[in-house]
Amino acid sequence: MCTMDFKKSLSIHSAAIGAVLLVFACPLWANSADPIRLDKHHIRIVFSDKEPGPVKIAFAALKKDFMRAMDAEPVVTETMDADRSSPEIVIVNRATGAIQVPSDKVKPLDGFESHRVYADPESNRIYVEGHDLRGTIYAMYTFSEQVLGVPPLHVWCSWVPVKKETVAIPGDFNLYYRSPQVRYRSLLPGDQDFFNPWKKRSAENQNVWLETALRLKLNTVETYSTIEPGYRLTDYANLIDRYGLVITAHHTCALNTSFSTWEAYWQETRHQDPPKLLLANEPAILEFFRYNAETVKRSGIENLWTIAFRGRKDQPFWSVFEDAPDEERDRAEVINRMLRIQLDLITEVTEDPDPYVRITFYDEIADLMAKGHLKPPASENMIWTFVAARRDPYPYDDLIHFTADKPVKLGYYMNFAFASTGAHVAPAEGPWKMEFNYRYVSSKSPLYFSVVNVGNMREFLLELSANAKMLWDYDAYNTDQFMLDYCTQYFGAEHAGAIARLYRDFYHAYWQPKATEFPGMARQFLFQDLRYARAFDHMVEEFYASEGDINMNPLHKIGYESVPGRTFRIDLEHNHSTNQVDAMLYGMTQTIPKFESVAARCSDMMGQLDEDKQTFFNDNLRVHSHYMAHLSKTLYHYVYAYKHQKDPAALGKHLDLAYHEAVRAQQVLFEAQHGIFSTWYSDAEPLNRTFQIDRLLTRIIQLKEQDK
């Protein structure tokens, strides 16, 4: 819990920005007298065994970092040594008070999660101090990054350490992080067709992403349903809690679950046949709500409550309740009532008159909110979480209409990945677009909660890192500077500027099928890799569908879209075309040279990088640029074959070319399979709304067979 008023923490936070930036901008050991020298054979750490489990997990990681960076096995003790001849690293958690800084050496911290790492040459000690549990964890990971040189993404970037015999820490070293400007900073691993099989391969894979979240100084994980029969939470929820992260539920999940667990509750907990999902069965619904709330309370986890009233999955409640009303106002009234019931229940169960609770305005909820029908609860600790527009992340109408005249806190949900039509295999939105969205939100009111959907995580490490940096310190964050720092850290200072430009050019290579409409935003509408996938899906059903004229607008299916045109965003006039087929051909002729240019420059850059920097550069940028170049050529030839399907020669030639380019796309993607990621793509779970090249290749072969 924050120990100081949030707005006060904002006002004092900027005071430390200059000092923090100075540390990052200058060489760590520059111009310092009387350094403290850590010798690999004499490293002593003072750490209390009374610290809570999450701090112990982070401490175990810190000891591994010493082995990674120095091949050093630290000596651990619970008391500071009076003999000052050898240096000590002292881990201090002010919340527990298990170890305390001597009164004459204390330096100030402020509120929640603040932390400091500083040297005291007089006592030959380095203090690694946090205000609370997570502040202490962040302090240890700050030491690892800034002193030992272990980057936050060390697992994902195939980091190769340069072993050190000694580390000299300047006598005036003093790195201080005040409380973050955003209280809850969350990530959501979304559709995990690559991630889930990978996590199952080892216990380390299962856990390391949570360590990464903490190294980036995030503090919350958004989950799907975590309620099980018998007043138990899922192993997934308990794992997140074990690492010291807050749990919050997805927008489908009221009180940490959705109606997908309705039958299991009645059958396995109440041992009876489930009643029908009817609004008329309100007593049964309230009993279900109470069980879920009590399960969370009994667990003792740190939980940011979510209230919602939706269907079994990512769908409106009226899709599963047979007696749901038909009119929007009546539907909104049902939601208003259920939200109030859930909030009152949380207040009762927690015995907290004003608990922290969030509601997410997603899809139909956002529409009802924008139209003024939804009247969600408002209170000092109620977090109204607005969502970037579905399928393309930009501020939606409900946020645009929001005015800060309600006693609520503000949250924001943005998809870096979006299964079905967004980025999935390759990143597309980029950190500049992220910053634009978040600057707009903060122009409405200070942001209190954030969640970003990072899909399988590995593809969106850059965006996630940028988001974490911005959420901690809005005032200091600048994407151009972040990119330079990121590229310096992971690829070296010599080529950092050139690689930052390569990243920018990669993001700008995507086809923009529609002109920007939101004032000031660049690249509002993009044709991400899953839009390619959906185009393949739609068009395969139209091949050979008619003996007459070819359907030149094959991407719109009756009943497919709740908002017409939202799936593909293709504006014909913008693409100098009169139909979707020609618009796609035009779009691919625009985007292919851009991706090819970036891909060629990336391949050239690979040879200039130090060998230990090449793997991550290849995984995180070069592979994506080549993949998108080949995927774009696949779509071009596929669409060309579709347009000329009445011409056997053209049809066969371009289906062959489409097949060849799809094979090349898969081959280049598999270049990122190595080491612990050796089956990242090849072991993917089948997930129809994502993209499986093998399925596309099979379809192209089938089309060729049909032609015969």
Image (tube, rainbow, N blue to C red):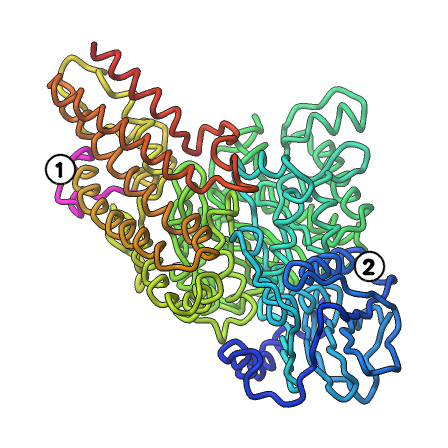
Residue 357 x %, y %: 66, 55
Precedes in sequence: disc 1 or disc 2: 2
Q: Is residue 539 above or below residue 40?
A: above
Q: Which residue is mark 2?
A: 52
- Amino acid type, mark 2: Pro
Residue 187 or residue 22, whichever sits in front? 22
Quadrant containing the C terminus is top left
On residue 305, which mark appears?
Answer: none
Real-space Cα distance between discs 1 and 2? 65 Å
Query: Label 1: how many residues lie within 10 Å, few (<14), some (14-19) or many (20+)?
Result: few
**Extent of the magenta region:** 569-582
> Is residue 87 shown to the viewer in this render?
yes
> Is residue 337 shown to the viewer in this render?
no
Snapshot quadrant of residue 55: bottom right
Task: Identify which residue is drawn at 66% across, 62% down.
Answer: 381
Q: Is residue 100 left or right of residue 405?
A: right
Frontmost of labels 1 and 2 is 2
Q: Is residue 251 above or below residue 7?
A: above
* Disc 1 element: loop
Query: Label 2: how many residues lie within 10 Å, few (<14), some (14-19) or many (20+)?
Result: some
Residue 641 x %, y %: 18, 25
Residue 171 x %, y %: 67, 86
Q: Is residue 703 left or right of residue 287?
A: left
Residue 415 x %, y %: 46, 49
- Amino acid type, mark 1: Thr
Task: Identify which residue is drawn at 44% across, 32% down.
Answer: 689
Q: Is residue 326 left or right of residue 149?
A: left
- Say if the magenta span includes residue 682: no
Task: Identify which residue is drawn at 55% across, 59% down.
Answer: 411
Q: Which residue is mark 1?
A: 578
* Disc 2 element: loop
Q: Is residue 507 left or right of residue 5?
A: left
